[in-house]
Amino acid sequence: MAARFSAVPGRTRFRFLPNASPKSGLAARNPMKAQVSPKQLARAIQVSESSVKRWCDQGGIMTVRTAGGHRRIAIAAVLRFLRENCYELVRPEVLGLPANAGRTAWVLDRAQAAFRDALLSADEDQARRILFDLYLAKHPLPAMLDDVMAAALRGIGERWSRGEAAVYQERRGCEICLRLLHELRMVASTPSVPRGLAMGGTPEGDMYQIPNAMVELVLRLQGWETISLGSGLPFDTLRAALLTHRPRLFWLSASYIRDEREFLAGWNELCAPLTFPVAFTTGGQALLEPLRGQMPQATFCNDLKALEAMAESLGE
């Protein structure tokens, strides 16, 4: 099964336990920096500082200047530079990345098992290392999220159903994933001229935050300006946000639906005629085929790879 905008595993008894914000809980031991200096990047990849400054001045690395005229490089620009060039990341910890990041060539299925085990044992450093290894190895982000993070969380849910994992392990794994998604968001810089505005959330009763964070991250990396409205929102407030912000793309993720009749009534209220064009997309494990057939206004995306393709088509 693919992510379907929903990475939350297990049975419905989990559904009333909302995830905390990405900043909650224990911070990562070596948090990723928002910006670095040319000297720090030079130390990280073992080249001269003058070389890094020259690349910055030539436009090879996007750079900003402080009020005092010093060069600063956003971590998004650093990782983009590393993905596009062949420099070895010798000292990743200088950038706030896990030690040895970028040195392991993972295949996705092996990465998924290792990531699952890291979540079960609360080894946040190992989980971060796996994700950034994959990112620096140029694995597509939707594949990383669908085939590694979401698959790992489903695997933990399956273990719980067999009595091989505890609820606290699933909840703790979700907390770690939210923090990692927050870090990945730092590398997803929106271009100065974005494709358009995308916004969305989850319906009332669905308190899962991971699907929203995943959708927002994929769209940001694709060049969209994004607004995540949050989780557990009544359809009338979703409609109010839609009318206020007038997005080009609106997503709704549904991992849990309390009452299908109420859900469909609210959905039709959300999609009532508008004076501006908007594309609706939906996903989530609660949207089974019979229900999707009653939602003709939206494109259903079975996973994040399908979402990326759908959003890409809007720019053509």
Image (spheres, rainbow, N blue to C red):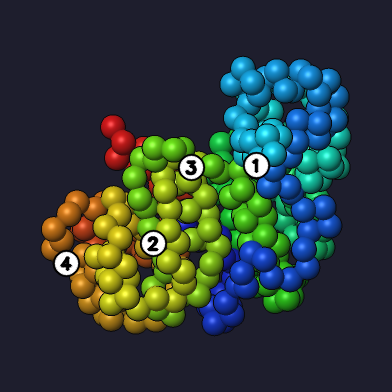
Residue, disc 1: 67
In percent of width and height, residue 191 lies at 46, 37
Q: Earlier in the sequence, mark 2 or mark 4?
A: 2
Residue 243 vs 135, above or below: the answer is below
Q: CA distance from mark 1 to mark 2?
A: 37 Å
In this rendering, would 297 be left or right of 84? Answer: left
Which one is closest to the eye, mark 1 or mark 2?
Answer: 1
Residue 173 vs 78, above or below: the answer is below
**Corner quadrant of residue 86:** top right
- Which residue is painted at 83% across and 20% down in the image? 48
Residue, disc 2: 200
Q: Earlier in the sequence, mark 3 or mark 4?
A: 3
In percent of width and height, residue 37 lies at 75, 36
- Specify few, some or many for label 1: CA neighbours under 10 Å numbering under 14, 14-19, or 20 or more: few
Kindly check if marks 2 and 4 are in contact, taking CB atoms under 8 A apart as contact. Answer: no
Kindly check if marks 4 and 1 are in contact, taking CB atoms under 8 A apart as contact. Answer: no
Q: Nearer the viewer, residue 36 or 183?
A: 36
Q: For the residue labelled by badge 2, is the local secondary structure a helix, a strand or a loop?
A: strand
Kindly check if marks 1 and 2 are in contact, taking CB atoms under 8 A apart as contact. Answer: no
In percent of width and height, residue 101 lies at 79, 38
Q: Earlier in the sequence, mark 4 or mark 1?
A: 1
Q: CA distance from mark 2 to mark 4?
A: 16 Å
- Specify few, some or many for label 4: CA neighbours under 10 Å numbering under 14, 14-19, or 20 or more: few
Residue, disc 4: 272
- Specify few, some or many for label 3: CA neighbours under 10 Å numbering under 14, 14-19, or 20 or more: some
**Disc sitting over residue 190 in the figure:** 3
